[in-house]
Image (cartoon, grey):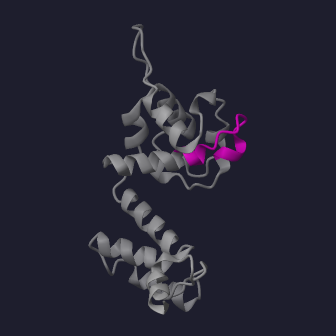
Amino acid sequence: MKIIGEKEIKANTALAEEIKKRCGENVFLCYQCKKCASGCPSRAFMDSTPTELMRYVQLGMTDEAMKSNTIWFCLSCQTCSARCPQDIDIAHVVDMLRIIVQERKIKSKTGHATLLNRIWMLLLRYMGRMYEMGLAGMMNLLTGKPFKDMKLAMKMIKKGKIKILPSIKKPLETNRMFAWAKRLKK
């Protein structure tokens, strides 16, 4: 955290209130016990810990909360949420911060992490599960390196680690990708 000096500091609660309104999580319940940070598997790669992220949101330090790589390197594994003694769903708060960052079109310092997140969510929405080949292919195509992982992909396909075609787990009625097929039947 940053020490600003002895002058009086007024916290801006707008971000915390927006998060509470949109996802129902009260970040002011966090009392900085650091259990979330001590269990975080991707903590080593983050600019700040989940604990510090919660403090940034509490104090209204929007730039620190939204421009760091912490929200993009979060795996959404729920370890922080499971460890929180206040039952704050920290992973949900992180997801909400990602949404707010994308809505406000805030640039992050993480390179292509926002693009990766958008492709990931798009695939989940339309496929109902992750399609690794599609994720890597779209990521490489949109970053201008379409053949970047071709050798590795071929090795993984030969060993049966990834599939060329996706398996769609959503029923046809709920899968938006095939909504056009339903309309044609009528």
Closest to the observer, 182 or 76: 182
Find residue 105 and report its horizontal and vertical position in percent.
31, 49
The residue most toward the front is 186
Find residue 84 and report its horizontal and vertical position in percent.
69, 39
Closest to the observer, 160 or 16: 16
Q: Which residues are magenta?
A: 80-93
The residue most toward the left is 144
Q: Quadrant of residue 113?
A: bottom left
Lateral position of residue 20 relative to residue 60, left or right: right
Is 146 colored magenta in this rendering?
no
Q: Is residue 96 visible?
A: yes
Relative height, residue 185 to residue 2 (above, below)? below
Q: Residue at x 35, y 60 (%)?
A: 112
Relative height, residue 62 to residue 164 (above, below)? above
Relative height, residue 159 to residue 174 (above, below)? below
Lateral position of residue 30 relative to residue 82, left or right: left
Q: Quadrant of residue 134?
A: bottom left
Total marks in image: 0
Is 82 colored magenta in this rendering?
yes
Find residue 81 and report its horizontal and vertical position in percent.
66, 45
Q: Residue at x 43, y 18 (%)?
A: 3
Lateral position of residue 173 relative to residue 87, left or right: left
Q: Is residue 69 visible?
A: no
Relative height, residue 163 to residue 9 (above, below)? below
Find residue 60 and report its horizontal and vertical position in percent.
43, 28
